[in-house]
Image (tube, rainbow, N blue to C red):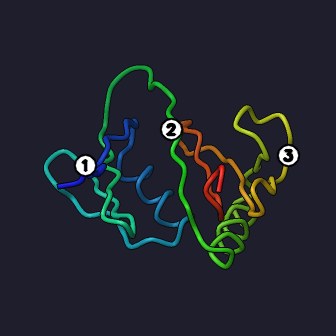
């Protein structure tokens, strides 16, 4: 059997709000509860399992490969929320990038995680 990523745990102070933000912005089905988690399923079978934690949250980076049409929809949803987008992971250049013949942008989740959407895998 090939090794595949199955899920990862995403820390937040409000798992439901964090999961809802991700599903709303990315246009995914609502999270489902599983034990202490709010589980968001990706199209490739990998899930983000949001979990409430106390104290400081270590910021993580999560990148999502999406279609050009989905990119337009995500960018529109972020504009509707008046959320800034960035062309680079350090948030130094506003907007989006065109690496590898696709488009990509970065934005922050409510918990401060650095989220990214790209239409072409890097190095592709």
Category of crowding for the residue at label 1, using alpha-carbon neighbours closer than 10 angstroms: few (below 14), some (14–19), many (at least 20): few
Q: Residue at x 21, y 58 (%)?
A: 33
The residue nearer to you, when weighing 68 against 106, is 68
* Residue 121 versus residue 67 in the image, above or below: above
Name the secondary structure under disc 2: loop
Q: Earlier in the sequence, mark 1 or mark 3?
A: 1
Q: Nearer the viewer, mark 2 or mark 3?
A: 3
Cα separation, mark 1 vs mark 3, equals 37 Å
Q: Residue at x 72, y 65 (%)?
A: 75
Q: Is residue 66 left or right of residue 83?
A: left
Q: Residue at x 28, y 56 (%)?
A: 39
Category of crowding for the residue at label 3, using alpha-carbon neighbours closer than 10 angstroms: few (below 14), some (14–19), many (at least 20): few
Cα separation, mark 1 vs mark 2, equals 30 Å
The residue nearer to you, when weighing 25 against 8, is 8
* Residue 17 versus residue 43 in the image, above or below: above
Instruction: Residue 111: give its label.
Output: 2
* Residue 8 versus residue 64 in the image, above or below: above
Name the secondary structure under disc 3: loop
Name the secondary structure under disc 1: loop
Instruction: Residue 94: give its label.
Output: 3
Q: Residue at x 36, y 53 (%)?
A: 16
Q: Residue furthest left?
A: 35
Q: Earlier in the sequence, mark 1 or mark 2?
A: 1
The residue nearer to you, when weighing 121 against 12, is 121
Q: Is residue 103 left or right of residue 19?
A: right
């Amino acid at each position: 059997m090939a090794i595949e990523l199955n899920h990862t745990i995403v820390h937040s102070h409000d798992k439901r709000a964090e999961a809802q933000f991700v599903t709303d912005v990315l246009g995914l089905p609502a999270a489902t509860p599983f034990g202490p988690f709010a589980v968001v399923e990706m199209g490739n079978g990998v899930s983000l399992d949001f979990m409430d934690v106390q104290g400081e949250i270590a910021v993580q980076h999560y990148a999502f490969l999406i279609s050009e049409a989905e990119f337009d929809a995500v960018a529109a949803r972020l504009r509707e929320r008046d959320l800034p987008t960035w062309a680079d992971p350090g948030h130094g250049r506003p907007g989006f990038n065109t690496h590898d013949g696709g488009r990509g942008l970065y934005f922050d989740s409510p918990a401060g995680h650095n989220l990214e959407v790209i239409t072409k895998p890097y190095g592709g």
